Image (cartoon, rainbow, N blue to C red):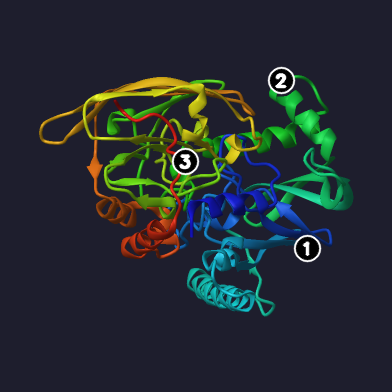
Amino acid sequence: MRLRLLLILSALLLRLTTPATATEQEDDFILYRGERCALETHWLFPAPLQAYFADGKHGEYPLKMVSTANYRGHVATYEIADGRLYLAKIEPSAMVRMVELSLPNASKKTGEAAVAAAVKKEQARLDETLRQIFPGRAAADGRIFADWYSGQLRIFCTLKKTKFQHPDEKTPHEEIMPTEVALLKIKEGAVVKETRFPLEEYWTKFEIMQRRREIPDEEAAAITDHLEFLDSYSRNWNKIPGVDDAKGPLRTEADFSVFLTRQVDARVRIPLTKFVLVKDTALMPYDSKHWTGDEDLRIKPGAHLLMLEMGASNVPIGPWSPYAGGAVQVLAQVGALKTGKITFTQEDLEKVRMINNYDHQDDTLLKLDGDLQMDVAADGKVQLTGAVRLTSKDPTTYQEIALDKTEIPVLTLQDYLKKQERESEIYKLFQKTAEKVYQEVLEKSKTSPEKKTPGKSAK
């Protein structure tokens, strides 16, 4: 399954409150006042089940990230009943239901069967995990009293049908949307305070509070508690189990060599997760609006592909984390491996992919320019010097990849795919192997038509 399927999924999921600079997270749910409502769950607002592991007293967080849109590894349903918070159940992420998209040649019946099998297997694994976390704790109805949780909940509730028309749609369609926000303060699983707002009024007052203006004391206290709770996690991402538990503590720029510099509200340097020159490799025909996955490559002797990427899922935790959402992929087709210059102009926009919050519109990317000097040594080592500059909008963002005699790994396609198999979250998620991907590329290379290469070769 291609990385772009993660992007399709994130577009399908219910989005309400995630900060604009991070991949929006698949919501948890909560049964509240007789409704199944959305429970805010995102990078800076860990779910109650994650909070169980945040103090380090209950071992390591046992669930693994499913996708960039669900780092918790599950979807939970909680319940407020008799003034108490319960964990009712955990279920597989919607990503599991995307299995059939990895079977392009399968019949609908085969695809549905594959989805059903994948969901059943994942549900059994989650049920067993929950039993191991809380042995003997479940009540007769299967609920678990969340007495470990003290903190804030933000619930989007009081659902009503409304008509919505996207600018690209000819006719409106019907959506079920929340009309209220409930802020709940929880202490050891018990609701100690509850404040409700009409949705639009809440956002107005939320913004007023951020500007430190006056609103009624009780409402101000509820919003302040909520903001302070968010801030307590934003100061240290390590407290959120499952976000990036394999990467360890916060890391500094000294740990990395190649960066994308991004400026939205602040200038921040974000590590590139991939910079590589893949030999004898070109591109399959593709939709220029989407990310190029490894299955989109094709074998072409004498053509070499330069990839400079800031990935969506593999950016390590660091001071750049609040600004890392939305991935960038810059591609350049290189001819002979010899010293020369690669020039980026406005005509080369198809070299660049902007995904997540940078892929809302066709004209998101406004400007592209830059030059890279490629120096090839006698032993075949490649160094790049120069910069690629990008300007995008929604949000308006200025980005630059600057290289200064930076050595770029030069790999064969097979070695590149083996490296991806070892390091890529996507490969691990879908149990892809380098050999399977290589065979797929090999078969497509035999039958695919030639495609005009995106950009000018080094001369």
Query: Residue at horizontal 61%, vertical 54%?
Result: 9
Tag 2 and tag 1, C-beta contact below 8 Å: no
Q: Is residue 67 left or right of residue 417?
A: right
Of the residues tagged 2 and 1, which is closer to the observer? 2
- Graded by Cα atoms within 10 Å as few (under 14), some (14 to 19) or many (20 or more), the crowding at tag 1 reads few
Distance (Cα) linking label 2 and label 3: 26 Å
For the residue pair 343 and 312, the one nearer the viewer reads as 343
Residue that label 1 marks: 82
- Circle 3: residue type: Trp
Q: Position of residue 95 (x, y in %)?
A: 57, 61
Question: Label 2: few (<14), some or many (≥20) within 10 Å?
Answer: few
Residue type, mark 2 in image: Arg
Kind of residue sitting beneath label 1: Asp
Q: Is residue 65 visible?
A: yes
As drawn, the label of residue 237 is 3
Residue 178 higher or lower than 134, as above or below: above
Q: CA distance from mark 3 to mark 1?
A: 33 Å
Q: Residues within 10 Å of mark 3 (few under 14, many from 20)?
A: some
Q: Nearer the viewer, mark 3 or mark 1?
A: 3
Q: Earlier in the sequence, mark 2 or mark 1?
A: 1
* CA–CA distance in space, label 2 to label 1: 35 Å
Can residue 325 be seen by looking at this rendering?
A: no
For the C terminus, give its image quadrant.
Answer: top left
Query: Which comes before the other along the chain, label 3 or label 1?
Result: 1
Q: Position of residue 365 (x, y in %)?
A: 57, 28
Q: Nearer the viewer, mark 2 or mark 3?
A: 3
Considering depth in this image, is 437 or 71 the residue closer to the camera? 437
Viewer-proximal residue, 417 or 164?
Answer: 417
Give the structural element (helix, strand or loop) at label 1.
loop
What residue is shown at x 56% (from left), y 21% (from top)? 265
**For mark 2, what is the residue?**
212
Q: Is residue 81 above or below residue 289?
A: below
